[in-house]
Image: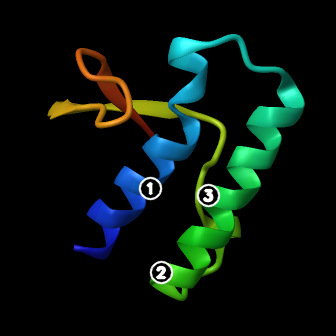
Amino acid sequence: MKKLYILIATSFLLSGPAVAKVDATTVQAATQTAQKAYEAVTGNDAGDVNWSSYEEVPGIKDPASPGHKLRVLQ
């Protein structure tokens, strides 16, 4: 359940690139926020996660952008 929460929170934070042009600074800030959320929720080190590649979650729509597929960090 914690991983699902992390996926949803991360997708919400990083869904901006799908609907607007976002600069590298904004993406970096969102990634840092996602890393902090990951550590807070799981208690695990965010350094153990690959934060550079995205994956689509089959069967789940992006709650922030209805009609778009949910993209999450692996």
Percent from the top left, x then y, of residue 55? 40, 32
Percent from the top left, x then y, of residue 23? 83, 21
Q: Give the side of residue 56 with respect to residue 46, left or right.
A: left
Q: Is residue 52 visible?
A: yes
Q: Give the side of residue 9 with respect to residue 43, left or right.
A: left
Q: Nearer the viewer, residue 54 or 62?
A: 62
- Neighbor class of circle 2 (other Cα within 10 Å; few <14, some 14-19, many 20+) is few
Point out which mark residue 34 bears: 3
Percent from the top left, x then y, of residue 56? 32, 29
Q: Which of the two discs, 2 and 3, labels the residue nearer the N terminus?
A: 3
Spatial separation of the CA atoms under disc 2 and disc 3: 10 Å
Marks 1 and 2: CB-CB under 8 Å?
A: yes
Question: Which residue: 80% across, 47% down?
Answer: 29
Amino acid type, label 3: Ala
Spatial separation of the CA atoms under disc 1 and disc 3: 7 Å
Amino acid type, label 1: Ala
Q: Which of the two discs, 1 and 3, labels the residue nearer the N terminus?
A: 1
Which residue is labeled 2 in the image? 41
Residue 16 image-quadrant placement = top right
59 up-or-down from 41: above or below: above
Percent from the top left, x then y, of residue 12? 46, 43
Question: Which residue: 51% across, 16% down?
Answer: 18
